[in-house]
Amino acid sequence: MSTFLETDRLVLRAFTTADTDHLFALDNDPEVMRFINGGRPTGREAIETRVLPRLLHDYPCWGNRGYWAAQDKTTGTFLGWFEFRPLEEHSSAVVELGYRLNREAWGHGYATEGARALIRKGFTDLEVERVTANTMAVNTRSRRVMEKSGLSFVRNFTGDWREAIEGSEHGEVEYEITRAGWERR
């Protein structure tokens, strides 16, 4: 297991093909996927051929991944994943922050804990200049995690949805934190 980052309660590690069952369960919980695809199930083939290859991708600017499996540090239980990936393959200046956790992990502060640790690592070790995050405007829980992690609201925008889902008519929001802003905190 290749550990990327540890917090008081979390281990963020590289994904492997052995995580297929975890990802299948995560992406087939309608509540977890509510603001992603309206809660529709994801087939096992899609996990194996689309989702997992994206999570296993190494970014040349880091020589490392941009998605990390999140485990409970004490029990080893799979909690979900965090995204902290460069928006450009060969530049770590701007990264996107994201998270998808099992419903059982909600409300325990794991998303904020992991996001804060990734932001800190980005600004101290990875030459990141700006961290950005997006969600649906109606996804108040995710927006709260962004705010508690130090990100500030930037703008509302209308995303390009292949299929509209409940709440998409309200658009999306972007949040960010810059290195300078993080250093002032």
Image (tube, grey):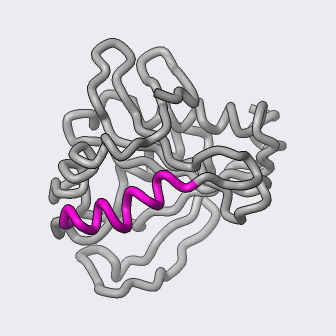
Q: In this view, does 3 lie above or below 119?
A: above
Q: Which of 56 and 69 is in front in this view?
A: 56
Q: Which of 77 and 46 is in front in this view?
A: 46
Q: Report the side of 127 relative to 107 (left or right).
A: right
The residue that appears at 36% across and 54% down in the rendered structure is 140
Task: Give the quarter of the figure containing the C terminus.
Answer: top right
Instruction: Classify residue 73 by image quadrant.
Output: top left
Q: Position of residue 71 (x, y in %)?
A: 36, 28
The residue that appears at 53% across and 45% down in the rendered structure is 147
Question: What main secondary structure does the magenta stretch of the protein show?
Answer: helix
Q: In this view, does 152 lie above or below 50?
A: above
Q: In this view, does 161 lie above or below 184?
A: below
Q: Where is residue 101 in the image (x, y as percent from the top left)?
A: 32, 43
Q: Report the side of 130 relative to 83 (left or right).
A: right
Q: Position of residue 116 (x, y in %)?
A: 57, 33
Q: Position of residue 163 (x, y in %)?
A: 29, 86
The residue that appears at 27% across and 37% down in the rendered structure is 106
Q: Is residue 26 above or below residue 12?
A: below
Does the magenta run of residues contain 48? yes
Does the magenta run of residues contain 165? no
Q: Nearer the viewer, residue 83 or 76?
A: 76
Q: Report the side of 161 relative to 113 (left or right).
A: left
Instruction: Classify residue 45 by image quadrant.
Output: bottom left
The residue that appears at 46% across and 85% down in the rendered structure is 160
Residue stretch in magenta: 42-57
